[in-house]
């Protein structure tokens, strides 16, 4: 029988064995960098009994995340602190430039500690603590704003739903919306014969427009496909309003509510300065009559903080009822 030579097929296998043995028997210092890493990985795998190289622990990403937390923290905290510091510096310069006729930050802070030590004292109908004045102003805002919401939001739905009414009321809204709040106050005093009712009327008439306009715009921007589906399903007008329009219009409506609350809080301060009684606006005017500038500055900060809290609360409410984040 003919003898088959095995030298040909065995030669490549012997060469591969020789190359592998040469690589693994050579010192690590003389091997190339890539070969050295491969040998170390194989040795590490052999030492653990798996025979495969394992990736190293992901330490660098953890360091990046740990380093990113302080950066995010400082980006959130440092700019407001810089703005507050700039305000204090400018305030101090103005106080020094006016010969301390405008109190500086230190004197105002000392006065604020005394004011907030007893915010709910009562020495008479016209001498009450700052806390009672703020609560009375918030009560008027709540009543006037609530009445405006009860009227403005349904009116916005109706105006947005019916094109004829939208064209009829658009000129009236455009005419009355820019009117100054104080221009409505004398009419309130004439009709309601009382300062408290006149202030509530002023809040009502000034805060109703943002809710009417935003709600009507939201209704008009509802996709026509939604209305076609309602027509196919033969839904009633009430079902269309509650199941289709309300979820789609809710972001617009909450934006109008937020704008209306800000307007109401601005209006009440000016109205109370003219009507008197108990309220943060009257408290500011009374302190001016007493030439107590420190308390006026304290009231300015209180008005700003209360307005900020109201706006932030409504932003959180809007974010809870919408799919996209609502920002100021």
Image (cartoon, grey):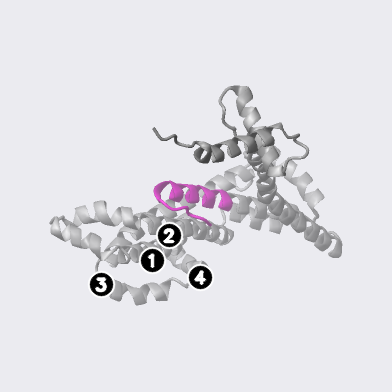
Relative depth, front residue between 269 and 303: 303
Say which residue appears at 40% left-offset and 75% top-offset.
174
Asked if labels 2 and 1 touch by Cβ distance under 8 angstroms, the answer is yes
Residue 320 is covered by the magenta coloring? yes
User: Could you give the CA–CA distance between mark 1 and mark 2, rounded to whole angstroms?
Assistant: 8 Å
Residue count near mark 4 (Cα–Cα under 10 Å), binned few <14, some 14–19, many ≥20: few
Camera sees residue 292: no
Q: Secondary structure at mark 1?
A: helix
List x then y, in percent, for residue 287: 69, 54
Query: If you read the primary sequence from the N terminus, does the residue marked by circle 1 or circle 2 appear first?
Result: 1
- Rendered image: mark on residue 191: none
Q: Secondary structure at mark 2?
A: helix
Residue 258 is covered by the magenta coloring? no
User: Please, is residue 109 above or below residue 86 in the view?
Assistant: above
Q: Which residue is mark 2?
A: 256
Q: Which residue is mark 4?
A: 180
User: Could you give the CA–CA distance between mark 4 and mark 3, rounded to whole angstroms?
Assistant: 28 Å
Asked if labels 3 and 1 touch by Cβ distance under 8 angstroms, the answer is no
Q: Residue 101's quadrant in the figure?
A: bottom right
- Rendered image: mark on residue 213: 1
- Rendered image: mark on residue 163: 3
Q: Which dot, 4 or 1, sits closer to the camera?
A: 1
Please identify the quadrant where the N terminus is shown.
top left
Say which residue appears at 62% left-offset and 39% top-offset.
120
Say which residue appears at 46% left-offset and 62% top-offset.
202
Relative depth, front residue between 74 and 249: 74
For the record, the magenta segment spans 307-328
**Horizontal relation, residue 217 to residue 66: left or right:** left
């Amino acid at each position: 029988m003919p003898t088959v030579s095995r030298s040909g097929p065995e030669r490549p296998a012997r060469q591969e064995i020789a190359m592998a043995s040469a690589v693994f028997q050579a010192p690590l210092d003389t091997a190339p960098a890539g070969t050295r890493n491969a040998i170390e990985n194989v040795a590490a795998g052999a030492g653990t009994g798996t025979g495969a190289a394992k990736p190293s622990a992901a330490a660098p990403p953890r360091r990046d995340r740990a380093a990113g937390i302080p950066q995010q923290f400082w980006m959130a905290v440092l700019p407001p602190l810089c703005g507050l510091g700039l305000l204090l510096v400018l305030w101090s310069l103005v106080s020094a430039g006016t010969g301390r006729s405008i109190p500086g930050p230190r004197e105002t802070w000392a006065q604020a500690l005394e004011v907030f030590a007893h915010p709910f004292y009562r020495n008479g109908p016209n001498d009450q603590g700052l806390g009672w004045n703020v609560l009375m102003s918030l009560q008027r805002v709540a009543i006037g704003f609530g009445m405006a919401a009860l009227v403005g939001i349904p009116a916005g739905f109706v105006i947005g739903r019916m094109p004829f009414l939208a064209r009829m009321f658009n000129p009236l809204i455009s005419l009355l919306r820019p009117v100054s709040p104080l221009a409505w106050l004398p009419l309130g005093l004439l009709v309601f014969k009382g300062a408290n009712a006149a202030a509530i009327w002023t809040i009502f008439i000034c805060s109703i427009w943002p809710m009417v306009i935003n709600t009507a715009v939201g209704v008009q921007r509802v996709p026509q496909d939604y209305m076609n589906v309602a027509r196919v399903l033969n839904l009633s007008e009430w079902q269309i309003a509650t199941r289709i329009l309300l979820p789609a219009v809710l972001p617009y409506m909450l934006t109008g509510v937020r704008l209306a609350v800000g307007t109401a809080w601005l209006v009440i301060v000016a109205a109370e300065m003219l009507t008197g009684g108990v309220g943060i606006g009257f408290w500011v005017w009374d302190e001016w009559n007493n030439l107590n500038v420190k308390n006026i500055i304290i009231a300015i900060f209180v008005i700003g903080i209360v307005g900020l809290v109201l706006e932030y609360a409504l932003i959180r409410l809007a974010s809870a009822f919408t799919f996209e984040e609502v920002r100021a």
